[in-house]
Image (tube, rainbow, N blue to C red):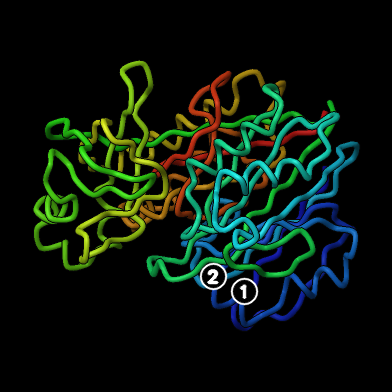
Amino acid sequence: MDIQQLIYSNDTASKEFSFTPDLIFVFGNRELLENRPISQQLHQIYPHAVFSGCSTAGEIAGESVADNSIVITGIKFKNTRIESAAIPLVDIHYNSNEAGQRLVSQLPPEGLKHVFVISDGIRVNGTDLVQGMRAGLAPDVTLTGGLAGDGSKFQKTVIIEPNGDLASESVAAIGFYGDSISIGFGSRGGWDSFGLDRRVTRSRDNVLFEIDDQPALDLYKSFLGDRAKDLPASGLLFPLSMRDSEDRAPVVRTILGISEEDKSLTFAGDIPEGSFVRLMKANNDRLIRGAEEAAVACTEDMPSSPEFALLVSCVGRKLVLKQMVEEEVESVSDVLGRPAIAGFYSYGELAPFNKNESCELHNQTMTITTFREV
């Protein structure tokens, strides 16, 4: 495959690729995307290209991490076919499960190998979205992706539709077809649980009302102390580990919003009643090691080093790592043999935790999808 990357900032003039791409990924600052119709302009130049991307909480290009930029990656495949799908959430009354089912129903099933999905990062229930997509896909089709970001503002996210248009409150997917493409994936965290297991005593979908029969928001604020005044953004530094059964590995859940009225916390994915949660914290070394472990998982069963890697890492990791944030990207690049890299910091990551397991919504992970044509 041929790969070329273009990076735009406020004062960057328009650029073009040196080849005609089949697929164009666009990741950027929301306000820049809204004020500069770059993807729409590229669609006019490359009308047959399929677009994918979103607003971010930070853009990844090569081994660099930036804010207030737009990273555009063009890919021309040798023998791989791609198809696209998109659905506005309003069309199905914000039913995320139905959105997932309808989305994958638009992708022709014959020869489908992998689906990469980009979703709205605020109005979607990531757990339900994944369940809907899994229900509509054959068991041997793998699924990865991420939820769009908006820095630490949590106000609005946008995605890039397959025709290059911007859309809010929407979900889009790219299907990869045929035996010429090898795809790997890995997702790891590096956060540590602490304190006691606490039982979820009242919740509805992704809204948590009570923990151990106490108002969830009040209990969580008591954990945060002085940082409670900065919620929901400060919640990114202290996610919850959640397990809903003894035989499943815990998943991480990050707060997207709070309600002072009913003392609830809203998460990117479901928090079922009866599940157990623990507070989590991180240190830089453990987060960077987690990114390395995700990269190692990508290399399992891969015939050789990837040509291209898509990184979706959580905004919470970026806030913790601060000036060291590029070290987790560099560690991934080293393990993978320095392929072309693009990606973004997200409000949620979608991937199986291990090979031969189903895709799930994660928070606070580094999630990687790798590609190589054979």
> Residue 131 placed where, x, y %?
55, 36
Which quarter of the rendering shows the C terminus?
Answer: top right
Figure quadrant of residue 43: bottom right
**Is label 2 in contact with label 1 (beta carbons under 8 Å)?**
yes
> Residue 147 placed where, x, y %?
52, 52
Q: Secondary structure at mark 1?
A: helix
Q: Nearer the viewer, residue 244 or 48?
A: 244
The 10 Å Cα crowd at callout 1, few under 14, some 14 to 19, many 20 or more, is many
**Residue 323 visible here:** no
Q: Which mark is residue 33?
A: 1
| Residue at 72% across, 21% down | 303
**Residue pointed to by mark 2:** 29
Answer left or right for 249 relative to 94.
left
**How far apart are the alpha carbons under marks 2 and 1?**
6 Å
| Residue at 43% across, 33% down | 188
Q: Which mark is residue 337?
A: none
Q: Secondary structure at mark 2?
A: loop
Amino acid type of the residue that numbered disc 1 sits on in the rendered structure: Leu
Answer left or right for 4 relative to 56.
right
Figure quadrant of residue 194: top left
On screen, residue 53 above or below 373: below
> Residue 365 placed where, x, y %?
42, 41
**Residue 215 visible here:** yes
On screen, residue 353 above or below 106: above
